[in-house]
């Protein structure tokens, strides 16, 4: 998949929230860099004032590689509902890709497809 194809699919996934009428506001910032790299920063405020924050650093030189990412969904007060990320932890978790749940549990989880992630957010509304 090419970088432009990935970005188009990503935008379509976020657009799904708007199409269903669940978004109060959507702010997508894309920084396309040399050597087929990109940085995505997204903030979606939903109709119940919960917020989805997305940060991705992509390297698409040979294939789409999410070098780092964080998809955080929180309620109107800022309390975590869930977060997918691949940040290193101390102590070491034993796996890179993981999910944080609202109760503080961290477990191994691959970041879902953008459409599946949007469905997961919508299920909390």
Image: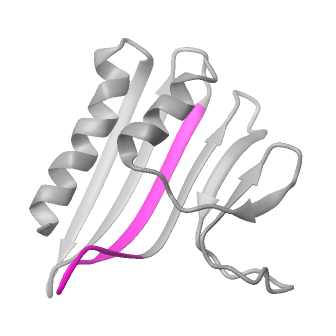
* Position in image of residue 56 (x %, y %): 41, 65
Q: Image height check: is 59 above or below 112?
A: below
Residue 116 horizontal side relative to residue 108, left or right: left
Residue 115 horizontal side relative to residue 38, left or right: right
Q: Residue at x 89, y 45 (%)?
A: 103
Locate the N terminus by quadrant: bottom left
Q: Main secondary structure of the magenta part?
A: strand
Q: Image height check: is 93 above or below 83?
A: below
Residues rendered magenta in the picture: 51-66
Residue 52 in the magenta stretch? The answer is yes
**Colouring used for the render:** one colour
Residue 14 horizontal side relative to residue 32, left or right: right
Which of 99/17 is in front?
A: 99
* Position in image of residue 119 (x %, y %): 47, 30
Q: Image height check: is 5 above or below 44?
A: below
* Position in image of residue 113 (x %, y %): 39, 49
Numbered circles on residues, count: 0
Locate the C terminus by quadrant: top right
Q: Residue at x 52, y 24 (%)?
A: 122
Residue 93 horizontal side relative to residue 8, left or right: right
Residue 25 in the magenta stretch? The answer is no
Q: Residue at x 10, y 61 (%)?
A: 4
* Position in image of residue 82 (x %, y %): 69, 45
Q: Residue at x 33, y 36 (%)?
A: 14
């Amino acid at each position: 998949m090419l970088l432009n194809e990935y970005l188009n699919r990503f935008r379509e996934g976020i657009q799904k929230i708007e199409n269903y009428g669940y978004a109060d506001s959507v702010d997508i910032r894309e920084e396309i860099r040399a050597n087929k790299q990109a940085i995505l920063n997204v903030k979606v405020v939903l109709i119940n004032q919960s917020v989805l924050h997305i940060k991705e650093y992509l390297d698409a030189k040979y294939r789409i590689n999410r070098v780092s990412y964080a998809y955080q969904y929180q309620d109107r007060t800022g309390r975590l509902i869930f977060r997918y990320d691949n940040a290193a932890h101390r102590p070491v978790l034993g796996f890179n890709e993981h999910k944080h749940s609202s109760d503080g549990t961290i477990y191994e989880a691959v970041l879902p497809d953008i459409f599946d992630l949007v469905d997961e957010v919508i299920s909390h509304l």
